[in-house]
Amino acid sequence: MRCALLGIFLGIFSVLVHFVDAWGPGGDLVDACAYNGSTFTDGYLLGAYCLNDQTAIFGYNYTIIDLNLCVGNDDGTLVGLENGSYSEGCSNCTTANRDQSLYLICACLDINGQQHSSSIDLNTVLYNVDGCAHCFGHAGNKSWTPPS
Ligand SMILES: *[C@@H]1O[C@H](CO)[C@@H](O)[C@H](O)[C@H]1NC(C)=O
Ligand SMILES: *[C@@H]1O[C@H](CO)[C@@H](O)[C@H](O)[C@H]1NC(C)=O
Ligand SMILES: *[C@@H]1O[C@H](CO)[C@@H](O)[C@H](O)[C@H]1NC(C)=O
Ligand SMILES: *[C@@H]1O[C@H](CO)[C@@H](O)[C@H](O)[C@H]1NC(C)=O
Ligand SMILES: *[C@@H]1O[C@H](CO)[C@@H](O)[C@H](O)[C@H]1NC(C)=O
């Protein structure tokens, strides 16, 4: 009986934790940021609105992060890599909403100088902390509205 009650309690608890995790100010890019309305400029600057810690008012900020801090080019393939500086070996980069996430897509050179189309799910490297996009402990900046 006790175990059953505990099981129910833990079940409810995990649902609550998941709910808070999905909608709270921290967590995944996809869960906490309006990635569908994101902007991508100069081939490496990603800007988006992300929820901040003012949960009572669903507060949000506009954050911009340099994706060169987050993604690298591994022999023609985009990979999550701290200070990866993918834009040195990749060109024609764009972002796209795909499979309920945001992808970075580029043409990247392999070690033989051949170009390959490659993409990476940015939700695997980016996360939100109080309205500010991060990767590998590097923080983007934040403001209230996008720069004009
Ligand atoms: C973003 O757009 C995609 C495709 O248009 C859609 O499937 C997805 O639900 C949207 N996500 C959000 C958070 O609005
Ligand atoms: C990334 O760059 C920062 C700032 O230059 C440096 O402090 C950090 O050690 C670097 N990390 C790696 C893994 O190279
Ligand atoms: C990059 O884009 C330009 C303009 O759309 C195009 O001419 C060029 O072929 C593209 N290069 C690669 C490697 O995709
Ligand atoms: C972030 O947004 C909040 C409102 O949600 C605002 O009060 C705060 O000034 C913003 N932070 C910055 C750095 O602009
Ligand atoms: C954030 O960084 C971007 C790119 O470097 C810059 O254009 C923007 O002015 C910065 N915003 C703030 C509030 O520092």
Image: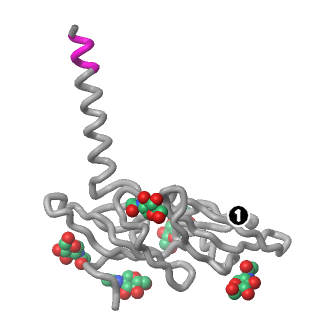
Q: Where is residue 60 shown, x and y percent of the image? A: 25, 69
At a point 46% along the width and 75% down the height, the residue shown is: 46
Q: Where is residue 30 shown, x and y percent of the image? A: 42, 58
Label 1 sits on a secondary structure element that is: strand
Pointer 1 residue: 77
Q: For the magenta stretch, what is the residue range? A: 2-7
> Does the magenta run of residues contain 4?
yes
Q: Is residue 52 above or below residue 144?
A: above
> How would you rate the neighbour count of disc 1 (Cα within 10 Å): few for under 14, some for 14-19, many for 20 or more?
many
Judged from this view, the residue extending furthest toward the left is: 56
Q: Judge from the rendering whether residue 25 lies leftward or rightward of residue 96; answer left or right.
A: left
Quarter in which the N terminus is drawn: top left
Q: Is residue 135 visible?
A: no
At a point 27% along the width and 47% down the height, the residue shown is: 20
Main structural element of the magenta stretch: helix, strand or loop? helix
Q: Judge from the rendering whether residue 102 lies leftward or rightward of residue 142; answer left or right.
A: right
At a point 55% along the width and 72% down the height, the residue shown is: 95
Q: Is residue 24 visible?
A: yes
Quarter in which the C terminus is drawn: bottom left
Judged from this view, the residue extending furthest toward the right is: 112
Color encoding of the figure: one colour
> Does the magenta run of residues contain 57?
no
Q: Where is residue 45 shown, x and y percent of the image? A: 49, 79
Q: Where is residue 80 shown, x and y percent of the image? A: 58, 60
Judged from this view, the residue extending furthest toward the bottom is: 148
Name the kind of residue labelled 1 in the image: Thr
Q: Judge from the rendering whether residue 10 lies leftward or rightward of residue 30; answer left or right.
A: left
Instruction: State the image quarter where residue 145 is shown.
Output: bottom left
At a point 37% along the width and 56% down the height, the residue shown is: 31
